[in-house]
Image: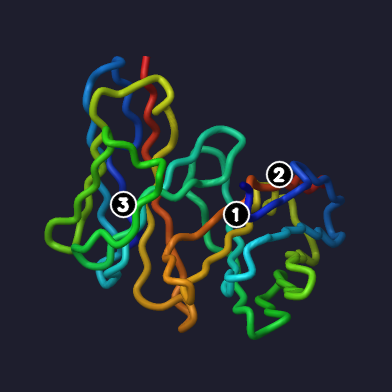
């Protein structure tokens, strides 16, 4: 049972344009969400997070939006740069439910075309 | 480098052998995770420690897998009688406090295991 779903395995965007990566979740106990970026043969690198009490969090070129009613979040990257090309993972946590683990989606491979 | 450190980075072993991976978390982090990642998948949770206590284990952590954090600092993940299906990247991660307090989870570079 995939509790965190990233339905787009890949996304191509022109440099300078907006990249929008989507994530859906099914577990209503999730109350903290994170996005990670991963290059091949490296560990995931934290990008940005959002608590369920917010609907938006912004950090530089990265903004995460959370729609709790739809159980959907998205990561916006503006403007996209070639160095953003990587696999992006959405992750969710339910600490309030006594679970400490992060549950990850399968990832979306972003390619930013110069 | 004060990040999460994992050793070895790469390990090739024959089926049936035992392997051990070590993780040194960020020094002030008392919470530590082990994850496994295979090709085309996201990281899958294996186990979680708070200080030396192992508080959560995944069903993926079969009897052949054991993780320890004896002094609440570094941790080891041992796989006994390795099988080809154990081939994966094993990731360690750590954090300082509650996620809701703004603490995030930092991952190491991972340890690649190939079972031949």
Most foreground residue, B6 or A22: A22
Marks 1 and 2: same chain? yes
Label 1 neighbour load within 10 Å: few <14, some 14-19, many 20+: many
Percent coordinates x, y for residue B106 in the rendering = 43, 62
For the point 46% across and 83% down, the residue is B101
The secondary structure type at the circle numbered 2 is strand
In whole angstroms, how far apart are the C-alphas of marks 3 and 2? 26 Å
* Residue annotated with mark 1: A37
* Residue annotated with mark 3: B5
Q: Is residue A89 above or below residue A34?
A: above
Percent coordinates x, y for residue A42 in the rendering = 48, 44
Label 3 neighbour load within 10 Å: few <14, some 14-19, many 20+: many
The secondary structure type at the circle numbered 3 is strand
In whole angstroms, how far apart are the C-alphas of marks 1 and 3? 18 Å
* Residue annotated with mark 2: A109
- When asked about the image quadrant of residue B11, the answer is top left
Contact check, label 3 and label 2, Cβ < 8 Å: no
Label 1: chain letter: A
Label 1 or label 2, whichever comes before in sequence order:
1
Q: Identify the image's colour scheme: rainbow, by chain, secondary structure or one colour.
A: rainbow
Percent coordinates x, y for residue A41 in the rendering = 50, 38
């Amino acid at each position: 049972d995939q509790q965190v779903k990233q339905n787009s395995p890949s996304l191509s965007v022109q440099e300078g344009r907006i990249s929008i990566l989507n994530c859906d979740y099914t577990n209503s106990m999730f109350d903290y969400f994170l996005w990670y970026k991963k290059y091949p043969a490296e560990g995931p690198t934290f990008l940005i997070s959002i608590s369920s009490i917010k609907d938006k969090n912004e950090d530089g070129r990265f903004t995460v939006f959370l729609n709790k009613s739809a159980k959907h979040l998205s990561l916006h990257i503006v403007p996209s740069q070639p160095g953003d090309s990587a696999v992006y993972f959405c992750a969710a946590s339910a600490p309030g439910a006594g679970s400490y683990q992060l549950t990850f989606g399968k990832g979306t491979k972003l390619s930013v075309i110069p | 480098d004060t990040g999460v450190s994992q050793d070895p980075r790469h390990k090739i072993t024959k089926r049936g052998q035992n392997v051990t991976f070590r993780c040194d978390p960020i020094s002030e982090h008392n919470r530590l995770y082990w994850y496994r990642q295979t090709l085309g998948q996201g990281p899958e949770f294996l186990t979680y420690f708070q200080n030396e206590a192992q508080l959560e284990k995944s069903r993926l952590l079969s009897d052949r897998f054991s993780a320890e954090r004896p002094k609440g600092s570094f941790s080891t993940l041992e796989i006994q009688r390795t099988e080809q299906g154990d081939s994966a990247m094993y990731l360690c991660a750590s954090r300082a406090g509650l996620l809701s307090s703004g603490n995030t989870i930092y991952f190491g570079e991972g340890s690649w295991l190939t079972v031949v």
